């Protein structure tokens, strides 16, 4: 039996009918066509499906869609302001912090969560916080450079 | 994933009634980080999922003069951000902080870690060291069990049909008491303990150990208390010789297996090293704890 889910995604009220076994990841991608959130492992190991749910960074593959009822979800689609990229997105481009791009939405959402919690992270803190976001292309160095650069720009702006 | 019926009751009574009356095989959900993976592997009959997070008190933590009262479903990210919890139970917070990635900590809970009953669960040795008590509600009413009796085997706990864990209570540490938790993993993060140790130590004003409790993990089907360590420590100044004896006691108490993450011999040695270091760190913290 399908369940009616009313939730808020990137500030907009959204509703859909899903099977209760559907993960939040599949609800976002297949039912709401928000395909920016990627599936890597589907088992909570890779972080490609990172989203923020009621203020906490989570793997959307480890959440049931029905749990989103009454919750506030933030996805990669809500990071840019229309055509204006977020500083984190600009810095990922500037530092070439991606190759194939599958890990990128998750890394950007996680970086935003990191900087919201800790606006001035050390490189070590950033590496530990982002340890759940796997990237098989870059070797992480460019990602960490982008994250640290974004942190310093956001700190100056605040 | 297997077909599921999902309920998120708002009271303990409702949850117990749902579980007790279900025709379907039922599963209780907290953060879901273990459960959703398990459900993906299941085939056959539909399952009832009872999500406990909407029940009042399941995601709160409070500290008063007697105890810390932890809602079992509170996610580790929220727990580890609580400075007041960290000040009283730094070892428990260390253990909660080691569970999975930032993303997993946004969901995984101490209660879930306990109920899932992995031999390598990080929070269990820390809970045992701190004499945690599990409060349980079920069709027959309420009962409480010491945390060391809660886990009964690999992936098994003492909850009977219809019962749920409603609260984890840790007695407030007395003066000059503190705890520590350490584990060994081959990587620097995001891994499962190969061996672990949690310790709580109470000193008096002269630095003599007045209470000590050591629990070790990932070296037996369940986390185990090293009673011999308490005997070695209590009544004494904690010297390097005593710490060496504590390490030997932990190694002797362990019953490890060999698997791809470590041999039994390696685990037996490492658990001793972790035990003496955890005792030493807890004692150092106890010295500074008011």
Image (cartoon, coloured by chain):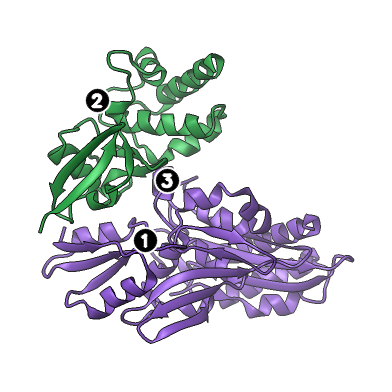
Chain colours: A green, B purple
Vertical side of B124 occupied by B230: above or below = below
The residue positioned 67% from the left and 58% from the top of the image is B88
Which quarter shows the N terminus of chain B?
A: bottom left
Label 2 sits on a secondary structure element that is: loop
Q: Nearer the viewer, residue B80 or B193?
A: B80
Q: Position of residue B258 (x, y in %)?
A: 41, 67
Give the residue number, with chain letter if any, for mark 2.
Answer: A100
Q: Nearer the viewer, mark 1 or mark 3?
A: 1
Q: Nearer the viewer, mark 1 or mark 2?
A: 1
Task: Count neighbours of disc 2 (C-alpha within 10 A) and say few if under 14, some if 14 to 19, many if 20 or more.
Answer: few
The residue positioned 32% from the left and 20% from the top of the image is A80
Task: Count neighbours of disc 1 (C-alpha within 10 A) and say few if under 14, some if 14 to 19, many if 20 or more.
Answer: many
Pointer 3 chain: B
Label 3 sits on a secondary structure element that is: loop
Pointer 1 chain: B
Label 1 sits on a secondary structure element that is: loop
Task: Say which mark, if any, is on residue B198.
Answer: none
Q: Is residue B65 left or right of residue A99?
A: right
Cβ atoms at labels 1 and 3 below 8 Å apart:
no
Asked which quadrant contains residue B8, the reply is bottom left
The residue positioned 38% from the left and 87% from the top of the image is B140
Q: Position of residue A137 (x, y in %)?
A: 31, 28
Cα–Cα gap, marks 2 and 3: 23 Å
The residue positioned 29% from the left and 77% from the top of the image is B17
Give the residue number, with chain letter if any, for mark 1.
Answer: B30
Give the residue number, with chain letter if any, for mark 3.
Answer: B101
Q: Nearer the viewer, residue B2 or B214?
A: B2
Task: Count neighbours of disc 3 (C-alpha within 10 A) and say few if under 14, some if 14 to 19, many if 20 or more.
Answer: many
Hey, which residue is sitting farthest right in the picture?
B206
Pointer 2 chain: A
Q: Position of residue A146 (x, y in %)?
A: 43, 20
């Amino acid at each position: 039996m399908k369940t009616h889910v009313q939730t808020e995604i990137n500030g907009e009220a959204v509703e859909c009918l899903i099977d209760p076994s559907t993960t939040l990841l599949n609800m976002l991608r297949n039912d709401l066509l928000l395909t920016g959130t990627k599936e890597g492992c589907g088992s909570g190991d890779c972080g490609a499906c990172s989203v923020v749910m009621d203020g906490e960074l989570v793997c959307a593959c480890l959440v049931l869609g029905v749990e989103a009822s009454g919750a506030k979800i933030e996805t990669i689609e809500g990071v840019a302001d229309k055509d204006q990229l977020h500083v984190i997105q600009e810095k990922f481009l500037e530092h070439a912090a991606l190759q194939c791009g599958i890990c990128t939405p998750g890394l950007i959402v996680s970086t935003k969560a990191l900087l919201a919690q800790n606006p001035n992270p050390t490189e070590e803190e950033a590496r530990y916080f982002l340890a759940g976001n796997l990237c098989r292309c870059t070797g992480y160095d460019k990602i960490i450079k982008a994250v640290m650069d974004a942190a310093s720009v956001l700190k100056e702006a605040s | 994933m297997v077909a599921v019926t999902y309920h998120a009751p708002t009271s303990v009574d409702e949850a117990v009634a749902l579980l007790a009356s279900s025709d379907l095989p039922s599963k209780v959900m907290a953060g879901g980080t273990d459960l959703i993976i398990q459900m993906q592997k299941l085939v056959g009959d539909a399952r009832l999922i009872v999500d406990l997070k909407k029940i009042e008190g399941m995601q709160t933590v409070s500290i008063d003069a007697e105890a810390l009262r932890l809602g079992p479903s509170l996610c580790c990210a929220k727990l580890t951000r609580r400075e007041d919890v960290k000040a009283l139970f730094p070892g428990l917070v260390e253990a909660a902080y080691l569970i999975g990635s930032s993303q997993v900590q946004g969901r995984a809970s101490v209660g879930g870690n306990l109920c899932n009953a992995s031999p390598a669960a990080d929070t269990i040795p820390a809970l045992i060291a701190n004499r945690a008590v599990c409060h349980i509600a079920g069709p027959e009413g309420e009962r409480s069990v010491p945390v060391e009796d809660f886990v009964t085997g690999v992936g098994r706990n003492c909850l009977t049909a219809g019962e749920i864990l409603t609260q984890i209570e840790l007695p407030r540490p007395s003066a000059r008491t503190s705890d520590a938790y350490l584990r060994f993993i081959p990587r620097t993060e995001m891994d499962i303990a190969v061996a672990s140790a949690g310790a709580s130590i109470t000193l008096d004003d002269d630095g003599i150990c007045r209470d000590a409790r050591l629990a070790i993990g990932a070296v037996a089907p369940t986390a185990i208390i090293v009673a011999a360590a308490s005997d070695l420590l209590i009544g004494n100044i904690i010297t390097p010789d005593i710490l060496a004896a504590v390490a030997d006691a932990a190694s002797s108490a362990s019953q490890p297996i060999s698997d791809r993450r470590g041999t039994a011999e390696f685990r037996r040695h490492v658990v001793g090293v972790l035990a003496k270091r955890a005792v030493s760190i807890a004692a150092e913290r106890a010295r500074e704890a008011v």
